Amino acid sequence: MGACVSTSRSTCSSKSNGEPVPPPCLGIGFCGQKRTKRTFSDHLVTLQHLPSIPNRVFTNGKSRTSCIFTQQGRKGINQDAMIVWEDFMSEDVTFCGVFDGHGPHGHLVARKVRDALPVKLQSFLNSCQSRQNEPGQTCFMGNSKKSDVGDLDKDGSVEDKLNSLWRETFLKSYKAMDKELKSHPNLDCFCSGSTAITIVKQGSNLFMGYIGDSRAIMGSKDSNDSMVAVQLTVDLKPDLPREAERIKRCKGRVFALQDEPEVPRVWLPFDDAPGLAMARAFGDFCLKEYGVISIPEFSHRTLTDKDQFIVLASDGVWDVLSNEEVVEIVSSAPTRASAARILVDSAAREWKLKYPTSKMDDCAVVCLFLDGKMDSESDYDEQGFSSATLDQSNHSGNAAESDDGQKSEPCLQRNFTVRSAEENDTYGRLAVEVDGDGETVSADDQSWSGLEGVTRVNSLVQLPRFSEERPDP
């Protein structure tokens, strides 16, 4: 048990106090900046403070540098969640994320991760910097360039330390997030979980951590000034050699069903369930002893003037649109504020054309424009977004939902993923705990069943037919 979980050690440095003398700091430093600017510690928040954050957007709308949009598919409750958080740790840092839930409580898992994971990133980064408060550490500005650091960067140590700091922060935050889900008193994650694709843009540095099969790409210009698609992440499917090897080493099984040979799944060693269509995820604790992990892949990229925008999306988009098609759609949108919505609309049309007998999956999209520019307010209103939506998005003050996602929010509902109408009827009779005070709501009341057709690809095939007592190996 636990043989699949590993930890990674990396270097982190101390935190700046912003005084004129050279203080030790790393990562989100503010050495030499005027004290009128907010420091990293000023941005530390708790879940209780989230509704008052002015630059945190999680419903359909836009921010200063991005637009986001989600649309419910035809499986029932929307299990996708998304977020853009500007001024995340300083004025030059932006956090973006897309989370695709699955299983009976996948919508609640995705929302919980959306809310809690960014806060954990802040906390661990602050802790790492404070713990290493030793003399002689290098100070980093959020938008520092190699020319700014002189001799300190001759051996690449500045960038290496910044990269190591963020790597450790992502690894610890994801580990803590999964641990919190496992012990959550009101959220059953035994057969429910979520993907996560998260990025932090700090000046010209892009740090990425991700699990599952949500994807991030970038639209960039080549030498001929033509737009090209650059895939930034890897879909962590069970058939990837490294993922399959780990799962099999932990006694899990990987194979595809006969009627969908292109979809490899993870199965318990003693039961043909649950058939998870990804190798890494938050939650899904029925499979955590058998090779499914929540350790993120981490990568770092230095952005250039050629890079135009980044798109994060759930697999409902990537199932029907290629990277190149997504870049073309976003780059040709009439306004930047409408790009995410137009992309989701395009995916919906492709679902109808390519898979007319299948239920469309939920779609969630985040478009981050790297030059920091967006459209005028009048252009935004012309695209059909009301000022009320804009106000709600920019202030994220959704009184209808707590940090646990206990109450529904606009456009964020979906069925847990099952393969057939018969299974929908079976699972639809399950009672689902929604409220943190223990109140349960029938799945039928949540419109989890009763839709015609079959699902093309589900993240889960069926729930395991066993209790916590398992047969001896």
Image: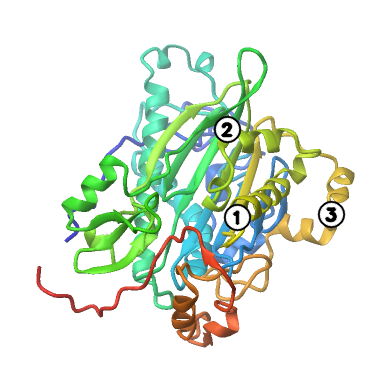
Q: Is residue 415 above or below residue 230?
A: below
Image coordinates for residue 463, horizontal then vertical, percent:
35, 73
Q: What amino acid is labelled 1 in the image?
A: Cys
Residue 304 x/y as whole percent = 58, 21
Of 420 and 144, which appears nearest the observer?
420
Given the image, on which type of amino acid does mark 2 rest? Met
Residue 66 picture quarter = top right
Q: Based on the displayed image, in which of its 4 quarters is residue 273 positioned?
A: bottom left
Q: Would you say residue 412 is visible in this rendering? A: yes
Judge the density around disc 3: few (<14), some (14-19), many (≥20) Cα neighbours within 10 Å: few
**The quarter of the displayed image where residue 226 is located:** top right
Q: Is residue 27 left or right of residue 463?
A: right
Q: Mark 1 sits on what residue?
A: 363
Q: Amino acid at mark 3?
A: Gly
Image position of 293 with respect to 422: above or below: above
Picture disc at residue 384: 3
Q: Secondary structure at mark 3?
A: loop
